[in-house]
Amino acid sequence: MLIDVHGHIGRVLPDRREFVDVTNLIAKMDAWSIDLTCVLALSEHPEGAYLESDTEDVLAACGRYPDRLIPFCLIDPRYGNRSDMDFSHLLEEYVMRGCKGLGELLPKMDFDDPRCLNLYRQAARFSLPVLFDMQDRPDGYGLRDDFGLPRLENALRLCPETVFIGHGPTFWAEISAEVPADNRSGYPAGPVAPGGAVPRLMRQYPNLWADTSAGSGNNALTRDPAFGLEFLDEFQDKLMFGTDSCQRSDVDTVWTTVATIRDLRTNRTLTESALEKIEWRNATRLLNLTAPQGARSG
Ligand SMILES: [Zn+2]
């Protein structure tokens, strides 16, 4: 059984030919032996030029494959542009219609902007974990934080009821105590220096989880293989497999994070129980899912 907590549909690139419709997503899942995918909304934020991937698009796509797809909803924290905006009418509706999480949250705002804290708190009231992307670049998309992730820590402390699912280059660069200033939104290579912000915060705050998705997650977990295995083992109760595949043609390859989880299974470098938690049990628990009939096991 394999659950991808980080999938997408729609036009994620400005190229209008790059439309991932729901059948392409299902084809990728079949090619990579993924049983269930969480489909994350994007279009509520203008930062990424995202099209046809707002919450309504996600709900419609998931409605076509209710046994394979799980919808996430998204609200831009700037909606209403105040730190006490009431989102409960939206959240209540989205939960009623089946949404299991809030994401992918990636506005170009400080992680602990009062408008973001307001949204985090309200998501928790509806039991929706918040999946975010963090990027250090001044332009483009992604929540911002300083070296050592003090703003994320502030949010973890101020919103103890909110479960955060970490993702993105700047989040994962901080797996190491040594973060290259010129590559904090990229894929730092080489050994991981102990004492990084991500392991420290994951150890200290029960409400910080992470997914393994994208080049950034895969890089963080494989750049220093021995450290990566220790990290997977230590945080086996709060890591979840993900892909973050955004293009149609991805179906022609074996996605990097899929290859990594297969390697772990083939080489038996993690215990069977740790692997099962990362593959599907943690997602099932966090998102309160019931495994579908006939789901592949093992
Ligand atoms: Zn994504």
Image (tube, grey):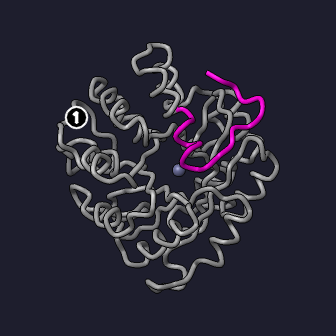
Q: Position of residue 140 (x, y in %)?
A: 43, 62
Position of residue 195 relative to residue 59, above or below, is above
- Horizontal arrangement in the rendering, residue 26 relative to residue 209 (left or right): right
Q: Main secondary structure of the magenta part?
A: loop
Q: Quadrant of residue 100?
A: bottom right
- Residue occupying the point 69% across, 25% down: 296
Quadrant of the drawing holding the N terminus: top right
Name the residue beneath numbered marker 1: 192
* Residue 4 spot, x, y in % from top left: 59, 39
Q: Nearer the viewer, residue 126 or 176?
A: 126
Q: Is residue 141 magenta?
A: no
State the residue in front, 116 or 121: 121
Q: In the visual, does 29 lie left or right of 276?
A: right
Coordinates of residue 19 in the picture (x, y in percent) = 69, 50
Residue type, label 1: Val
Label 1 secondary element: loop
- Residue stretch in magenta: 279-298
Question: Which residue shows up at 27% across the image and 47% down it?
Answer: 174
Q: Nearer the viewer, residue 256 or 212?
A: 212
